Structures are given as structure tokens and as C-alpha cells.
């Protein structure tokens, strides 16, 4: 009799765990849109060719994800922007990430975007929670054929000007069939290369001026569950 009670207890626990996972599991999600970034390197970004960064073997990026079409379960994410700033070359136990999200986003959108970007898009960095900064701030993003720009309060100004190709001045200088391990499948195979007219960042003890250094733009598509 006692054995049957114990077995019944185990069954009940497994059932509760199954219900709990079903309730708290992230819903299916998908985001696609335009990405542009500025980084530490000189224009041309050797990291894209498997070579070391041009400044102190360090690659710090400001990455702007503008979502043109997206959903998180039943919630739409169209038009939202998330900016992730981190050091791609730091060890996991030393690294840090700053996430900027638009303060005008609805609460459910903020929660959805944070799950997507902290746990999935930037999940490879394995940054401890205590070194992740999340801020909901005024944000302005604009994109034209040759210019990509993001301004976040007094913390970030990123203004990328794409480089005109000499063979066809109507097209930007491009890297086609890229060699880049991070977001290899999620980014388009073609990168439009540029230079940062302005790339200035300040948050906590992190601060830089990377004016004149590398930048690029491309399309992205991430999906999960």
C-alpha cells in the first residue's frame, strides 16, 4: 500500500512539472528586419575574415536590431528596436552587455524582447545576470540607402555611412558570402560595408569614441520554439 502511495506521489510530481514547463515555456517567436553596427576595428573589419581585431585584439560592438516584422506568440513586435552593446572578445566571466529598448514599447513587448535578446540572440555570450544592464530609454533610429543612425538618450550616438563601390557607385561596397561565426545563419550572406561618422557610447564605467571606425548593415531573421 505504501509503495503505491509513493508511486502515485512521483506521478503527481512529474505531471506538475510537465504542466509548469508548459505554462512558463516561451512561446514561438520570430523577428526579421535590418541590422547595423559600429565596432572597434578600422573600416573593413578583419573579424569578418577570421583575423584579429585591429585595436588591442578587442572587438566591442554597438548592434542595432530594427524589427520590421516580428511576433512573440500572439504579440506583435513590428517596428520595435533593440540595441545590444558588448565586447565580443571578452571572456564570459569578464564580459558585460547593455540592452537598450524603447521606453514607448508596451510592457508585454518589453518582456518579449528581453527574453528574445537576452536568452537567445545574445545567449552565446553567457554573460552573468549581474553584468547585464537593461534600460528603457528614448530612442531614435533612422535608415536610408546610404545612412544608418541610432541615438539613445545621452548614451549612444551611432551614425554609419555606407561606402560607395568604385565599380558601381550606385551600390555599396559589399562582403558577399561572409565568413563570420556569430549569427552566421541569422544574418544575410551579404554585408553592406561602411564607416562610422560618429560612434560614441557611455554607460556606467564603459565609454568610447570610435568615430571613423568600421560599420556594416545587413538583414536578419531569428526564430525560436
Image (cartoon, rainbow, N blue to C red):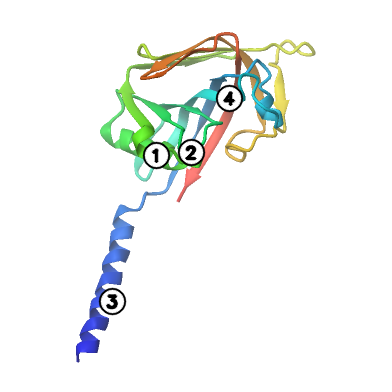
Q: Whole-percent x and y of residue 195?
A: 61, 12
Sequence-wise, which precedes: disc 1 or disc 4? 4
Residue at the (56%, 31%) spot, across then down: 89
Sequence-wise, which precedes: disc 1 or disc 3? 3
Sequence-wise, which precedes: disc 2 or disc 3? 3
Q: Nearer the viewer, mark 2 or mark 3?
A: 2
Residue 212 shown left or right of residue 28 in the figure:
right
- Label number found at residue 92: 2
Q: Are marks 2 and 1 in contact (CB under 8 Å)?
A: yes
**Residue that numbered label 1 is attached to:** 128
Please identify the quarter of the rendering in which residue 43 is found.
top right
Sequence-wise, which precedes: disc 4 or disc 2? 4
Q: Relative to the observer, which residue lies in front, 197 or 42?
A: 42
Residue 118 shown left or right of residue 195 in the figure:
left
Sequence-wise, which precedes: disc 4 or disc 3? 3
**Residue that numbered label 3 is attached to:** 11
Label 2 sits on a secondary structure element that is loop
Q: Quadrant of the N terminus?
A: bottom left
Q: Whole-percent x and y of residue 19?
A: 29, 63
- Label number found at residue 58: 4
Label 1 sits on a secondary structure element that is loop
Q: Residue furthest bottom?
A: 1
Q: Whole-percent x and y of residue 48?
A: 67, 28
Q: Relative to the observer, which residue lies in front, 166 or 58?
A: 58
- Label number found at residue 33: none
Sequence-wise, which precedes: disc 2 or disc 1? 2
Q: Relative to the observer, which residue lies in front, 103 or 58?
A: 58
Label 4 sits on a secondary structure element that is loop
Amino acid at each position: 500500500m505504501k509503495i503505491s502511495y509513493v508511486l502515485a506521489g512521483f506521478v503527481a510530481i512529474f505531471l506538475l512539472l510537465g504542466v509548469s514547463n508548459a505554462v512558463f515555456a516561451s512561446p514561438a517567436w520570430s523577428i526579421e528586419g535590418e541590422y547595423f553596427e559600429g565596432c572597434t576595428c578600422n573600416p573593413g573589419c578583419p573579424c569578418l575574415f577570421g583575423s584579429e581585431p585591429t585595436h588591442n585584439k578587442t572587438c566591442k560592438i554597438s548592434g542595432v536590431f530594427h524589427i520590421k516584422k516580428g511576433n512573440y506568440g500572439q504579440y506583435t513586435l513590428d517596428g520595435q528596436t533593440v540595441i545590444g552593446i558588448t565586447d565580443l572578445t571578452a571572456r564570459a566571466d569578464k564580459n558585460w552587455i547593455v540592452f537598450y529598448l524603447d521606453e514607448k514599447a508596451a510592457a508585454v513587448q518589453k518582456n518579449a524582447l528581453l527574453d528574445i535578446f537576452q536568452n537567445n540572440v545574445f545567449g552565446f555570450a553567457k554573460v552573468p545576470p549581474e553584468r547585464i544592464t537593461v534600460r528603457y530609454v528614448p530612442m531614435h533610429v533612422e535608415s536610408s540607402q546610404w545612412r544608418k543612425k541610432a541615438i539613445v538618450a545621452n548614451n549612444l550616438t551611432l551614425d554609419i555611412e555606407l561606402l560607395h563601390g568604385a565599380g558601381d557607385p550606385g551600390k555599396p561596397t559589399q562582403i558577399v558570402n561572409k565568413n563570420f561565426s556569430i549569427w552566421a545563419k541569422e544574418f544575410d550572406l551579404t554585408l553592406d560595408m561602411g564607416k562610422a561618422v560618429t560612434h560614441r557610447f557611455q554607460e556606467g564605467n564603459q565609454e568610447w569614441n570610435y568615430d571613423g571606425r568600421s560599420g556594416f548593415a545587413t538583414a536578419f531573421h531569428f526564430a525560436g520554439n
